[in-house]
Image: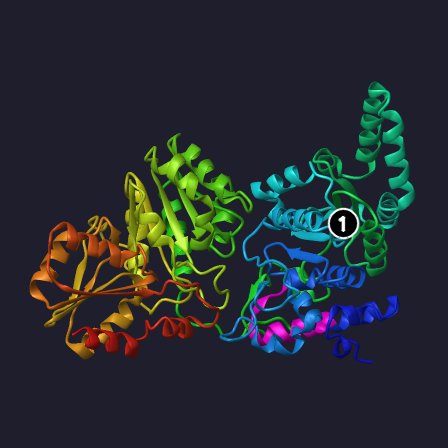
Amino acid sequence: MNYLDKINKPSDIKKLSRDELELLAKELRSFIINSVSKTGGHLSSNLGVIELTIALHYVYDCPNDQIIWDVGHQTYAHKILTGRRNKMHTLRQKNGISGFPRRTESKFDSFGTGHSSTSISAALGVSEAFKINKSKYRAIAVIGDGAMTAGMAFEGLNNAGNTENDILVILNDNDMSISNNVGALNNYLAKLLSGKLYGGIKRSGKAVLSKVPPVLELARKTEEHVKGMVIPGTLFEEFGFNYIGPIDGHDLTTLVDTLSNIKSLKGPQFLHVATKKGYGYKPAEQNPNKFHGVSKFDPQNGQAKKKNALKTFTEVFSEWIMDTAAKESKLCAITPAMSDGSGLNQFSKKYPKRFFDVGIAEQHALTFAAGLACNSLKPVIAIYSTFLQRAYDQLIHDIALQNISMLFAVDRAGIVGADGATHSGNFDISYLRCIPNIIIMVPSNENQCYQMLKTGFKYDGICVVRFPRGNGIGTHIDKKLNLLPIGKSEKIRDGVNIVILAFGPLLKTALEVADELNATLIDMKFVKPIDEKMIKKCVNNHKVLVTIEDNTILGGAGSAVLEVISKNNLKCKTLCLGIPDNFVEHGTQEEIYKLCELDKNNIIKKIVKQL
């Protein structure tokens, strides 16, 4: 019997027996593997939470009870069970469903999440609103162990534990090596500690002992020590939560029983669930990092479909850092939990003492790097554009204000494609160029990327090299080239009437436009410092000046050019092209460029209209 076809909303799950829930989990796992093999997406994390997702929807009443999924890439099972099964073939595609929770997509997506460690704070806000509105419903935050490395998670815990709100935090622990502790004893303890008998004894005991404070303190310490011997929950108890677990996150019976017990408890509850990434699919179990985010693959063996032969910009960075580390003993690499995505796996194996994965803790990553740099080391921070936003204060106060020398390799700048608005890197030029003491370089091809990383590392100051997701254009890398002169652009072709100033990877499109319109084309290379001499020359010799960038128009590279024109009281028709003032949807990079009117035909139309 096909159970999955009968599930169109969470209430349908409640009609199934416990044995049928197990069969539903098998069908759901198979469906996700086959679906993601066709669309690409996040796989291992989703396979790890199938039983937990089923149990949550079986016990709780969504969307009245609100589940907030941290990071959000682990919600495929949730989407399927909440009426979006027939849309999974559109996952992460233009006009399709998002790879993350999205409030505008479904009433079952209580809170949009795409970055880490936000769920506890959001769930606390939900629970507080429930209390004010005299609602009986519950707020549940599901947070992965990796997300617990971020300070915001502990800020949320600290605040929530100081309330009497009915909030449940579920730690989805899939990487803390506690599997040996998960078994019959721990499952039994979890049921006991989440049961009414234990809770009632605990409450009544506190009420009686509160009359004699010294005895209460002794009882509290005794309870902590006894629980600490059998379960690793003392930390969360100190935050004010009732800790339960760890339990087997793939045992549906235990999950349902424990969640059912917890539902009747009052106050902040913390459930520790042990799961395995990629559970139930051997290739993903054996290599969960490889299957964290995947392109299309063969579900029979897990092999990816044919790979593009061109190098990605991330691979260029990886090649550069390996070459440079062999010659520069002071080089050290830092990443906030993105070793694989940032191309640092090879570096981490060859230079383990100079590699630092600090976890999902971007703020810490930057200040940690500043400490290294203050003591003769040269840090290279490999970070996604969208994650660098999270450490903005540290970038200004701990690094730029002190002018501490380091290199930022900012990956996934500009349009990222399928991951959509939460991961789009289209703000970094705007938020970086207003900070003093920072140089910003924008490579247009693989060779330039290598050369700019080389230049940035040698520069005595703060350098940012921002490069896009995906493949280059096939440019040969010349590793013997000299360092770039800071702030100097390069003329690519001469033309008449129109001059195009291109910043970064859209140079290729700009060249096609320039050829068709017989326009002058300048590869600007630097956003800061910007080549003022070149801009003045271009204004004097052309009727229309056009800027093209893969950053938001507001405050971007085009704005920098306009500032130069204003500062020097120059007169010229101008046209600034970039990403419009709205959040970018998901789709292929080519589709999104066209949607933003940054494709060849749209650019030509806009320039002709300006003429």
Q: How is the image coloured?
A: rainbow
Q: Nearer the viewer, residue 405 or 64?
A: 64
Quadrant into which the C terminus falls = bottom left
Is-magenta flag for residue 41? yes
Neighbour tally class for label 1: few under 14, some 14-19, many 20 plus, Cα within 10 Å:
some
Query: Does 352 appear above or below 479?
Result: above
User: Seen in the image, is 415 located left or right of residue 48?
Assistant: left
What is the quadrant of residue 207 in the picture?
A: top right
Where in the figure is residue 475, as x and y percent of width and height?
30, 67
What kind of residue is marked 1?
Ser
From the viewer's perspective, is residue 419 above or below residue 464?
below
Q: Main secondary structure of the magenta part?
A: helix
Q: Residue 446: x percent and y percent?
A: 33, 62
Question: Residue 499: in sight, yes or no?
Answer: yes
Horizontal arrangement in the rendering, residue 494 relative to residue 36 (left or right): left
Q: Is residue 164 magenta?
A: no
Q: Residue at x 69, y 70 (%)?
A: 82
* Residue 173 shows up from this direction: no
Question: For residue 516, which quarter of the picture?
Answer: bottom left
How many numbered marks does the figure carry?
1
Viewport quadrant of the N terminus = bottom right
* Percent position of residue 196, x then y: 89, 45
| Secondary structure of residue under mark 1 | helix
Judging depth in this view, the residue of 139 and 321 nearest the camera is 139
Percent position of residue 417, x then y = 45, 68
Q: Along the line of sight, which residue is nearer the eye, 463 or 531? A: 531
The quarter holding residue 385 reads: bottom left
Of residues 148 and 333, the one nearer the viewer is 148
The residues colored magenta run 28-43
Seen from this angle, which residue lies furthest left? 540
Q: Which residue is mark 1?
A: 179
